[in-house]
Amino acid sequence: MSPFISFDIVSYAAGIGQLPATIIYSYIGSVLIGTTKTIVMGLLLLFAISILIFLFKKVWNDKKQLKDIIDVKDIN
């Protein structure tokens, strides 16, 4: 990408950025191997985590928008 940054450094940084997703995928994959009860629990866990991430992002964005509105009112 850039002649000043080593390709190896960029590769390692990208790998570290993917580490959390890799760990979660590996854990969920290990949970899904088993009985029906285990598969259902794994899917429910995945669904719950997805909802929590969505809600956290929504609250974060709403809070940021509210801060931006307050900052604009302070300027005026």
Image: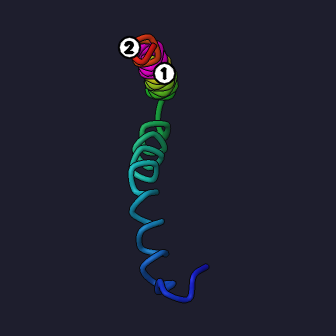
Is residue 12 depicted above or below 61 in this figure? below
Inspect this view and state whether residue 60 appears: yes
Residue type at mark 2 is Asp
> How many numbered circles are shown?
2
Q: Which residue is mark 2?
A: 74
- The percent coordinates of residue 14 (x first, y second) are 48, 65
Asked if one can make out residue 40 in the rendered structure from this viewpoint, the answer is no
The reply to whether dot 2 and dot 1 touch (C-beta < 8 Å) is: no
Whether 15 is drawn above or below 39: the answer is below
- Mark 2 neighbour class, 10 Å CA radius: few under 14, some 14 to 19, many 20 or more: few
Q: Quadrant of the C terminus?
A: top left
Q: Earlier in the sequence, mark 2 or mark 1?
A: 1
Residue 8: image tag: none
In whole angstroms, how far apart are the C-alphas of marks 2 and 1? 20 Å
Q: Which residue is mark 1?
A: 61
| Secondary element type, mark 1 | helix
Q: Nearer the viewer, residue 41 or 48?
A: 48
Magenta includes 51? Answer: no
The residue lying at 48 percent from left, 28 percent from top is 46
Which residue is nearer to you in this view: 41 or 60? 60
Q: Position of residue 40 (x, y in %)?
A: 50, 21
Provide the residue span drawn in magenta.
Answer: 59-69
Residue 54 in the image: x percent, y percent? 51, 21
**Secondary structure of residue under mark 2:** helix
- Nearer to me, 41 or 11: 11
Please name the amino acid that badge 1 sits on: Asn
Question: Which residue sits at x=49%, y=87%?
Answer: 4
Q: Residue at 42% x, 74% y: name it.
A: 12
- Which residue is drawn at the image coordinates 44% and 49% (left, top)? 26
How is the protein colored in the picture?
Answer: rainbow
Between 1 and 72, the one nearer to me in the picture: 72
